[in-house]
Amino acid sequence: MTTETPIQRLPRKLDSDAAADYLGVSHSTLPTWRSNKRYDLPYVKIGRKVFYMVADLDAWLEARTVR
């Protein structure tokens, strides 16, 4: 039996609201960033739905980490 951490149970892709929760920003922030092209945060668009890959969110956060 393997023990999973909560992060290991995350899906590979998150909708915009879940991605906002993951990043700790308001739900209106990601659509604003997309429309203003404020950050180069990769996303996947399928029809009208927008998804963020967890690996992309992690990489984006890592790139903004101040050491």
Image (cartoon, grey):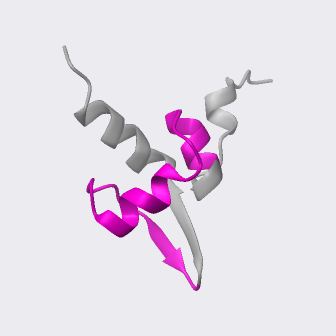
User: Residue placed farthest to the bottom in the image?
Assistant: 47
The correct choice, above or below, for 7 with respect to 20 in the image is: above
Please tell me which residue is depicted at 26% across the width and 24% down the height of the picture: 65
Tell me if residue 39 can be seen.
yes
User: Is residue 29 magenta-colored?
Assistant: yes
Q: Which of 14 and 16 is in front in this view?
A: 16
Please tell me which residue is depicted at 26% across the width and 57% down the height of the picture: 40
User: Residue placed farthest to the right in the image?
Assistant: 1
Is residue 27 shown left or right of residue 59? right
Is residue 31 shown left or right of residue 15? left
Q: Quadrant of the C terminus?
A: top left
Tell me if residue 15 can be seen.
no
User: Residue placed farthest to the top in the image?
Assistant: 67
Q: Where is residue 59 in the image (x, y as percent from the top left)?
A: 33, 41
Please tell me which residue is depicted at 56% across the width and 42% down the height of the picture: 26
Q: What stretch is highlighted in magenta?
A: 18-47
Q: Position of residue 60 (x, y in %)?
A: 32, 42
Q: Position of residue 66 (x, y in %)?
A: 21, 19
Q: Where is residue 56 in the image (x, y as percent from the top left)?
A: 39, 49
